[in-house]
Amino acid sequence: MLNFQISLRLLLPTLLFVGGLTMVQSQARELEIVVTDANGQVLPQAVVSIDFAPAAKAPTAAIIDQVDRLFTPFISTIQPGSTVNFPNSDNIRHQVYSFSPAKTFELPLYSNREAPAITFPEPGIVVLGCNIHDHMRAYLYVSPHAQSRLTDDNGLVILEAPSDATQVHVWYPGLGDETTAERHFDVASDQAQLRVQLQVAPQQQNPPPPSPLQQRFNKLKDHAH
């Protein structure tokens, strides 16, 4: 009997912790958000955030590749303290840099034999560029919020939200004079869906047409296959 009482005493904090965790998770709800642009068309890769911690922890590493002289993906989101790897899948060298206040850095010219990694400790918007290819541009949203996710190709994202009223934050390039400008939307406690329209046009990287030398090289490469 004594052994049982000792075991129960040791187990009680664990039971209380699990019970509290279950209670917190039961108070969460799914919130579906659709983001559209100024023309009412769905807007992929908008960053939607909420100050409510999800049950699953966000990953602490991400990848921004360079493919066909473009950053891939165009927009990424991470939590502060996460690390981003910058592989180069092209057959040419790139030189990645950023002058953003959230993180200033410059990587030397490198090919895919190296994949430099950079840690981003502070929240903010990091605008990425390539010193060799001016058209290459990407955005890294180092989130100041507990939960941030990107809309999919249908402009849709599902977040975990608290059961009471809350606020949703949406970011996309070009929302204001400041790169960090974002919009805020109130959500009622009984609201399961939210549709928001941003006064922006979809953005993307626009590579220049291949030079005559590149066109000749591509033709030779196609014939070789």
Image: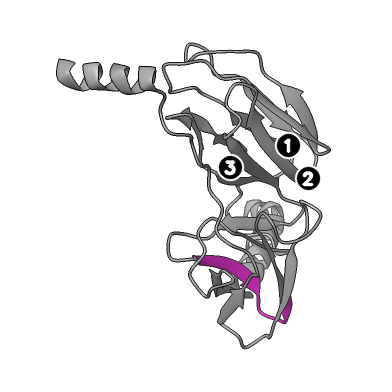
Q: Earlier in the sequence, mark 3 or mark 1?
A: 3
Q: Is residue 34 above or below residue 56?
A: below
First along the sequence among labels 2 and 3: 3
Whether residue 114 sits left or right of residue 8 in the image: it is left
Residue 69, given in percent of the width and then of the height, sits at 48, 29
- In the image as oriented, which residue stretches furthest toward the right? 101
Secondary structure of residue under mark 3: loop
The answer to whether the residue labelled 2 contacts the one labelled 1, judged by CB atoms less than 8 Å apart, is no
Q: Residues within 10 Å of mark 3 (few under 14, many from 20)?
A: few
The residue singled out by tag 3 in the image is 59
Residue 124 located left or right of residue 138? right
- Magenta extent: 156-166
Q: Earlier in the sequence, mark 2 or mark 1?
A: 1
Q: Quadrant of residue 37?
A: bottom right
Q: What is the three-letter code of the residue carrying label 3? A: Pro
Query: What residue is rendered at 77% in x and 60% in y?
Result: 176
- Return the residue at label 2: 123
Disc assigned to residue 81? 1
* Label 2 packing within 10 angstroms: few (<14), some (14-19), many (20+): some
